[in-house]
Amino acid sequence: MNRRPNTPPTWRLTDDVEEFRRAAGAHLAADAARHTILLTVSESLRTGGAGAGGAGPVRFGWWREAPDAPVTGAFVETPPHPPFLGTMPARAAAELARTLGGTPAADGTLPSGVRGRVADVEAFGAAWPVRRTGAADAPPYQLADGMRLFRLGEPVPPDPAPEGRARYAESRDIALAVEWLTAFAEEIGEPAGTDRRANAVARIEDRRLLLWEVDGAPVSLAGHAPLIAGQIRVAPVYTPPAHRGRGYAAGVTAAVGEAARQAGADEVLLFADHANPTANALYQRLGYRPVEEYATARLA
């Protein structure tokens, strides 16, 4: 498609999730696995999902090479979380850095970081125009918080099978779910701003939270996001320290993957922290296969 004269490629920014999904929905769904964050976050906001927002105004954006060209890039920003980039050309990532660097959020702040595929955040970080350090020779960004996206292939049962069984969390489990969701968030350094109780209640009501229990006592937890565009993302998986090392995480992870398949997912996905080799090894033993490398670019 030929670009019209004097119509440079641009980013369109909005705080309207419906507008974002109308414009970028087909692009996101075309590679649902790599857009799992953008799909699930925007869907939660669109449907009023509990805890979907953050501590500040949300912002969305999409990129076209020309006004009548298809969308080939997108991002979502839900403060206090940094912008999360979908797949995009390097040129789009660089232009987004310049756009966000010159366009503060509604609260007047600029991003201190950006998350997404390594290639995309590197292209963004290299073009970031704002220097906070005052040092002219300081690098514009530093990569941190490496994550790997996994997709479930052929499920493999835990071997050896752990003691206990899985069950869906119920209303009587709300207090425990809030405690464990909070502990998980603190353990991974998740910023505050989410209503954990509302999140727990929504997951329990939607049958998206499973507990692994032994002799009637819960010992591990796993949940999943809603089904959208054929994919479901598993998160979180949490076992309190006192119960670790006994295979309970393997049991509940296998169970939540099966629950996601039964809910209609064509793709069951999850993220694992590079700094947690135990989790990475566990997921691969259960049949998950690497898809893409992700990271955070901390902006100078």
Image: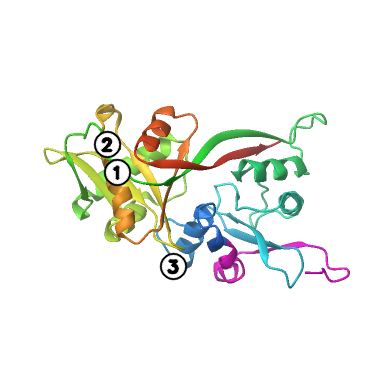
Decide: marks 2, 1 in contact (CB < 8 A)?
yes
Q: Looking at the image, which residue is at 33% across and 45% down?
A: 155
Pointer 3: what residue?
Answer: 47
Q: Which of 31 and 238 is in front in this view?
A: 31
Q: Where is residue 10 in the image (x, y as percent from the top left)?
A: 76, 62
Numbered circle sitting on residue 64: none
Is disc 3 surrounded by few (<14), some (14 to 19) or many (20+) residues within 10 Å? few
Please provide percent x and percent y for residue 163: 17, 34
Task: Magenta stretch: give its range.
Answer: 1-27
| SS class, disc 2 | loop
Q: Residue 254 carries which label?
A: 1
* Residue hosting label 2: 158
Q: In this view, does 147 lie to the left or right of 69?
A: left
Taking the image as shown, residue 114 lies to the left or right of residue 181, namely right
| Front label number (1 vs 3) | 1
| 1 or 3: tag closer to the N-terminus | 3
> From this viewpoint, which residue is outermost toward the front?
154
Location of residue 160 (image quadrant): top left
Q: What residue type is labelled 3?
A: Thr
Between 152 and 193, the one nearer to me in the picture: 152
Whole-percent x, y for residue 51 in the image = 42, 55
Query: Tags 1 and 3 in contact by the CB under 8 Å rule?
Result: no
Disc 3 element: loop
Give percent across and percent down for residue 194: 44, 50
Viewer-side residue, 287 vs 187: 287
| Kind of residue sitting beneath label 1 | Ala
Query: 10 Å neighbourhood of mark 2: few (<14), some, or many (≥20)?
Result: some
Image position of 246 with respect to 203: above or below: above
Q: Is residue 278 above or below residue 93?
A: above
